[in-house]
């Protein structure tokens, strides 16, 4: 390669290198946003989550001689019991006001427990990949006939293997995607704590509205 071309290539590399700090600073601000989005996806597919409020009502925490007022990112209700949750990056965790209190188990003055959700917990495998696979089927159309057959069969059996449940989708090009689409709607529950397998258990999920016929 001619010398002028090498100089030109070197200068271009230097210019690209000079811009890197600006590009590398951006992901730090996006990391927490991505974690929040992933956490909300987990809550959406978790049948144990009954309600989610954001932000949570402020709470008081007693840490030795100090009292800290803190409004958590979310209040998650499970089995009728509210829990406070903060979504934090590793950098945020190091300076969080309740980091020391967590060593002894942080409980608010009103009895609500407090916990952190970090990248390690939110993106833990295999749950993280399972949730992504389910959400990828969100826009899969499910005909009225397939919808009724799947839900009726689950009512009859209680719990079915994913592969058997998918067999009820007679009009769908992909029966598994049809079942997972219903999971995105909150009509069925898929165990997100394990990989998507033929034997993955599927259950009917309690709908948030009353059945007018009392079935």
Image (cartoon, rainbow, N blue to C red):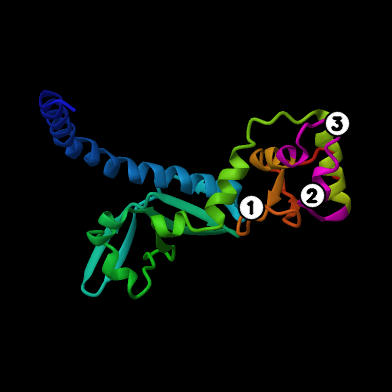
Specify whether residue 94 is in view.
Answer: yes
Q: Nearer the viewer, mark 1 or mark 3?
A: 3
Residue 111, percent across and down? 43, 66
Few, some or many residues within 10 Å of mark 2 (<14, 14–19, 20+): some
Q: Is residue 147 left or right of residue 3?
A: right
Residue name at image x 75 percent, y 36 percent: 174
Residue at (37, 65) in percent of width and height: 109
Q: Position of residue 180 (x, y in %)?
A: 69, 42
Q: Earlier in the sequence, mark 1 or mark 3?
A: 1
Label 1 crowd bin: few (<14), some (14–19), many (20+), radius 10 Å: some
Closer to the eye: label 1 or 2:
2
Looking at the image, is 153 positioned above or below residue 191?
A: above
**Residue occupied by mark 1:** 47
Q: Earlier in the sequence, mark 2 or mark 3?
A: 3
Residue 166, quarter of picture: top right
| Residue 127 located within the stretch drawn in magenta | no
**Residues at badges 1 and 2 in contact (C-beta under 8 Å)?**
no
Task: Reply yes or no: does residue 172 show up in magenta.
Answer: yes
The magenta-colored residue range is 157-178
Residue 170 location, x and y as percent? Answer: 86, 34
- Give the alpha-carbon distance from disc 1 to disc 3, as whole Å: 25 Å
**Which part of the image, by quadrant, shows the N terminus?**
top left
Q: Is residue 156 left or right of residue 45?
A: right
Q: Which mark is residue 104?
A: none
State the SS at label 2. helix
Query: Mark number for residue 163?
Result: 2
Foreground of the two, 174 or 10: 10
Which is nearer the eye, 11 or 171? 11
Q: Nearer the viewer, mark 2 or mark 3?
A: 2
Give the quadrant of the C terminus. Answer: top right
Q: Quadrant of residue 173?
A: top right
């Amino acid at each position: 390669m001619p010398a002028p071309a090498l100089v030109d290539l070197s200068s271009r590399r230097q210019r690209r290198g000079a811009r890197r700090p600006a590009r590398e600073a951006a992901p730090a601000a996006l990391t927490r946003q991505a974690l929040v989005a992933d956490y909300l996806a987990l809550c959406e597919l978790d049948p144990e989550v009954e309600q989610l409020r954001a932000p949570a009502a402020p709470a008081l925490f007693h840490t030795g001689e100090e009292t800290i007022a803190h409004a958590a990112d979310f209040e998650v209700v499970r089995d009728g019991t509210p829990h406070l949750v903060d979504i934090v990056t590793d950098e945020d965790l190091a300076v969080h006001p309740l980091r020391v209190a967590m060593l002894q188990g942080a409980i608010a003055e009103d009895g609500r427990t407090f916990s952190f959700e970090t990248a390690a917990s939110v993106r833990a495998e295999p749950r993280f990949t399972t949730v992504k696979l389910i959400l990828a089927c969100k826009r899969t159309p499910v005909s009225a006939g397939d919808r009724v057959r799947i839900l009726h069969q689950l009512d009859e059996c209680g719990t079915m293997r994913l592969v058997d449940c998918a067999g009820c989708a007679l009009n769908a090009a992909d029966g598994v995607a049809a079942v997972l689409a219903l999971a995105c709607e909150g009509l069925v529950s898929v165990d997100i704590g394990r990989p998507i397998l033929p034997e993955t258990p599927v259950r009917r999920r309690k709908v948030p509205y009353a059945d007018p016929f009392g079935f």
